[in-house]
Structures are given as structure tokens and as C-alpha cells.
Image (cartoon, rainbow, N blue to C red):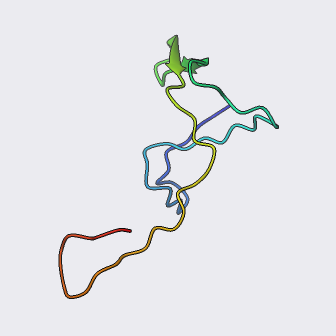
Amino acid sequence: MDIASCDVNGSSCGQGFQIYVNLDSVAPKAGDTYSFAITYSDGTTGTVSATVSSVLSAFATGLSPSGTGVSVTPNFS
């Protein structure tokens, strides 16, 4: 696959690169290792590995600013 920089074609992912990998219904587990075969722009190749450190099973919920007055420090409850 070819992974392009996020700032091309009007993308606004806010990161250097973005990739989506469909894992079907199997979620990764902490400790799983994934290897990536890469080809650099000069034609050389290499392999890098990444280990899953943790897996979140739900998004954070119920976060909302609270308090009164004006402050540069947010207060979440």
C-alpha cells in the first residue's frame, strides 16, 4: 500500500501520516506485534515493528466543561 502525507489533497487529519487498516471483528490485544515492510524514496527497504501497548474499548464520555467565570485552565467533571 502507498501511504501519503496527510497534508496532500486537502486532507486535515492533523498528523504526519494516516492509514486505515480493516481488522474485521478482531480487535488487537496489548502485547500484539505488527510488522511493516517499508520502501524508502531512495529504493532501499526495511522492516519496522510496533507493539500494541493498550487497547481502549470505548470512547471517553460525559466530558463537559464546568465551573463559572473566565479561566485559561479548563475544569472537567
From this view, report whether residue 51 is shown above or below residue 71.
above
From this view, report whether residue 45 is shown above or below residue 60.
above
| Residue at x 49% of width, y 61% of height | 12
| Residue at x 49% of width, y 42% of height | 17
Q: Nearest the camera: 20 or 30?
A: 30
From this view, report whether residue 17 is shown above or below residue 30.
below
Q: Residue 47: horizontal and vertical position, in percent?
A: 54, 12
Relative side of 21 to 52, left or right: right
Q: Nearest the camera: 27 or 44?
A: 27
Q: Residue 22: horizontal and vertical position, in percent?
A: 75, 38
Quadrant that contains the C terminus:
bottom left
Which image quarter: residue 29?
A: top right
| Residue at x 54% of width, y 63% of height | 61
| Residue at x 52% of width, y 16% of height | 49
Q: Nearest the camera: 53 or 34?
A: 53
Q: State the residue lying farthest toward the right.
A: 24
Quadrant that contains the N terminus:
top right
Q: Residue 48: horizontal and vertical position, in percent?
A: 50, 15
Q: Nearest the camera: 24 or 21?
A: 24
Number of on-image labels: 0
Q: State the residue lying farthest toward the bottom.
A: 69
Which image quarter: residue 59?
A: bottom right
Q: Residue 62: horizontal and vertical position, in percent?
A: 51, 68
